[in-house]
Image: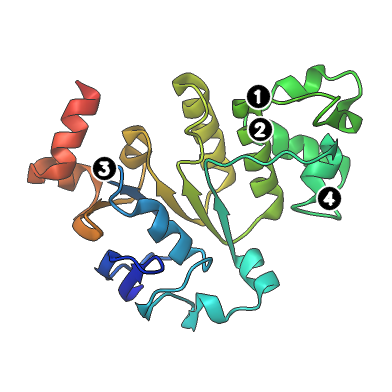
Amino acid sequence: MHGARFAYPEGVDVLHGIDLEVYPGERLAIVGPSGAGKSTLARLLAGIDAPREGTVSVGGCPVTDLDPAERRRRIALVTQEHHVFMGSLRDNLALAAPGAADEQMRSALAAVGVDWSTDLPEGLDTQLGDGALELNAAQAQQLALARLVLADPHTLILDEATAALDPTTARRTERALAAVLEGRTVVAIAHRLNTAHDADRVAVLEDGRIAELGSHDELVRAGGTYAALWRSWHG
């Protein structure tokens, strides 16, 4: 990402000349206050929105120039929104990998800490949605993460993807995902700072600009915005 600026229609810029390189296999956490532009940055990285100025590229190719199917194979964005579709649990998982075998689906569910699926009397054939089993927000988000595992993209963008989970479940899910996502490029919009602690590097976004960039330890030693956030969160 080089010189990226973005504004919503008839609005002022919410990102101001962002320069950011994400290395293959790296885990990068993005932290910052509400309204700093974190989710907008995630959408640009995923190719959902295009910068009004500057470039966002993958392997030298602008993300928005990629064929949509190719972009989905390379990059996956998981947000706080959780979609459960009418149909079976199998149908919902198959959206990410139509040819996946049942065992692959069960493995994906287990990988993100879904234990409730083993108690379903009809297993993967259990119907979801209105008039059937209705998942709560945490279960729906776990289902979205299981789809992510099945999709198996090279680059993952997690926009506060575990925000709907309670802290204990979120931590367990993030630990499980860390093992599954080993070797992949991960950009995580951090809702809880433990996500930043576990990352290779942390980018601090303030008012649409990257204010700090470095490892957790480096930024804590620097005594800036991130250090203050860490102290307030960690007590």
Under tag 2, what secondary structure? Answer: helix
Q: Hey, which quadrant is residue 89 in on the image?
A: top right
Amino acid residing under circle 4:
Ala
Amino acid residing under circle 3:
Pro
Q: Are marks 2 and 1 in contact (CB under 8 Å)?
A: yes
| Disc 1 to disc 4, C-alpha distance | 25 Å
- Is 108 on the left-hand or right-hand side of 124? left
| Disc 2 to disc 3, C-alpha distance | 26 Å
Query: Mark 1 or mark 4: which comes first in sequence?
Result: 4
| Disc 2 to disc 1, C-alpha distance | 6 Å
Query: Mark 4 or mark 2: which comes first in sequence?
Result: 4
The answer to whether residue 43 is above or below residue 175 is below
- Return the residue at label 3: 33
Under tag 3, what secondary structure? Answer: loop
Query: Mark 3 or mark 4: which comes first in sequence?
Result: 3
- Return the residue at label 2: 140
- Return the residue at label 1: 136
Amino acid residing under circle 1:
Asn
Q: 173 and 82: which one is in front?
A: 82
